Amino acid sequence: MSPEAYGQFCDELEMLDGAGTEYDPDAFQAAKQTPVYFGSAINNFGVQAFLDSFVAESPVPTSRRCGSDAIVEPGDPDFSGFVFKIQANMDPKHRDRIAFLRIVSGEFQRDMSVKIVRTGKSIRLSSTHKLFGRDRETVDQAYAGDVIGIVGHPDLRIGDTLATRLSTSFDAIPTFAPEVFSFLHCVNTERMKQYRDGVDQLAREGVVQVLYRVDAPVRVPMMAAVGVLQFDVVRFRLETEYGVQTRLESAPYAKLRWLEDSVQAEMLRTVSMPTGVHLYFDTHERPALLFPSAWTLRYFSEQFPQVHLIEAFGAVNLDAEG
């Protein structure tokens, strides 16, 4: 290293002084501290050091909550796990769809039969992979803490529990109320089938939430998200993966609240609601109300105190110690 390069290195290193705190393994294990690594994947600098540290410092599999009282331990003999991510078109040639499952307890054996606790349906886990970048390899065995990719089961949803016993059901992954809303139109009507398939798949992946207005003359999906960048992701993936060009139209809403059940939804369809308030259903068939402003939401709550409005579904699935 030249003296000039070394001097620049020292100057840039001093800039980091005081930017953080000294690494404490105990604080990291307690989820109170996050280590920061510096490197360059494109130049393959620091990548191996990061992977080695990740393996050495990562916590061992821990117990997880199952309902209000029960706890599932990693050493329990019965197999269980939950789907935390779904990704489609990872292999564009085959249009595959992979559900990523984290094993919580028991031992996984390829071709074993498990149940989708949400539906009670039994499925056979015959096509399972371990993925790293673009590389895949078939998984024949896996244990608590491992993540496997399950191919070919369109019934799986994010948050689903897979287990050998129906009595095992992990807390749902939370769904929070979105903050931005836009209608998504298909520019070329000849691509409507691909458009519908793409919207349905991206909604299943959780890229955005998709809602449809009750009794609307034209069934146009409305995108709902936390930030507008998610809309750009949807449009880009629809164009690159499904060959569909779309157009966004801003929706006149600012707040969303789910209803407790379909009974309340049917009741609200028979009454006069405040101006701008409309009833929608999400992709899980849960009824929701859309409000044009926070003021309208407060006014509605005062006028209909018997209606239970829900801002978020599910509880955060923390480790039992948390």
Image (cartoon, rainbow, N blue to C red):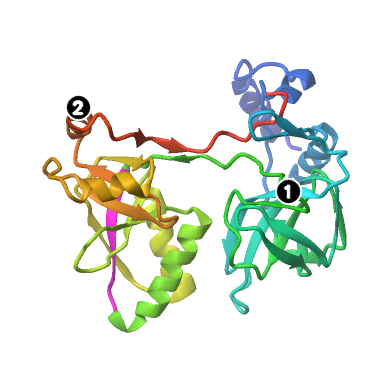
- The spot of residue 184 in percent (x, y) is 30, 62
Count every numbered label the image shows and give the total: 2
**Residue in the image at 33% along x and 34% along y:** 308
Does 89 appear in magenta? Answer: no
Q: Which residues are magenta?
A: 180-188
In the image, is 103 to the left or to the right of 172?
right
Q: Amino acid at mark 2?
A: Glu
Type of residue at label 1? Answer: Gly
Q: Quadrant of the C terminus?
A: top right
Q: Is residue 77 visible?
A: yes
Q: Is residue 188 above or below residue 1?
A: below
Residue furthest to the bottom in view is: 190
Residue 130 in view (yes/no): no
Question: Residue 81, which numbered label?
Answer: 1
Mark identifier at residue 302? 2
Q: Residues within 10 Å of mark 2 (few under 14, many from 20)?
A: few
Quadrant where the N terminus sits is top right
